[in-house]
Amino acid sequence: MNFASVNILSILIAGAAAWIFGAIYYGVLGKQWMAAQGKTMEQCKQEQAGKSRVAFFAPFVLALVGALIMAWGLYGILVHLNSFTPRAGMISGALCWFGFVLTSLTVNNAFGGRKAMLTVIDSIHWLGGLLIIGAILGWMGR
């Protein structure tokens, strides 16, 4: 990929949009997500109370960086496919989710003894994020 011709703005917008989607998604499903982890709201509050500001915000920063890296990776795939349309972006995002994200989450959570609902909740989040990233990258083009 020729970095001189990369549409950085599309990557930044797509990554930020996926990150915002995640914030809204987990804001709505926070209680179900915690229950799937086997935690209560009180336990979560106790864990957060002992953290520094840096430790508290670090996961949010990592989530943003992760979304930006995903957007950059999916952009690279679309460059190699030479297919920048919202449809192509969403199909590519869905295939990346199915082939890599869903499988990784399922295996990691299975070996970790996590509840199946945690895999369902988290995998739907990543599917939504990759569909958003793909649609925006495909729409904004090279």
Image: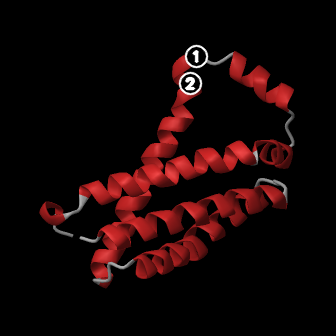
Quote the CA–CA distance across marks 1 and 2.
Answer: 5 Å
Name the quadrant containing residue 65. Answer: top left
Residue positioned 48% across, 75% down in the render:
90
Q: Which residue is mark 2?
A: 55
Residue bearing mark 1: 52
Q: Label 1 amino acid? A: Ser
x and y, in percent, of residue 93 in the image: 49, 72
Q: Which residue sits at x=41%, y=76%?
A: 86
Relative to 16, 41 lies left or right: right
Instruction: Please report the residue visible at 85 percent of the width from the left and 25 percent of the height from the top.
Output: 42
- At numbered mark 1, what does the secondary structure look like: helix, strand or loop? loop
Residue 99 shown left or right of residue 107 in the figure:
left
Q: Position of residue 108 (x, y in %)?
A: 69, 59
Query: Decide: marks 1, 2 in contact (CB < 8 A)?
Result: yes
Q: Which mark is residue 41?
A: none
Total of numbered circles in the picture? 2
Picture coordinates of residue 117, whole percent (x, y): 82, 59
Image quadrant holding the N terminus, namely bottom left
What amino acid is found at the position of numbered circle 2 in the picture? Ala
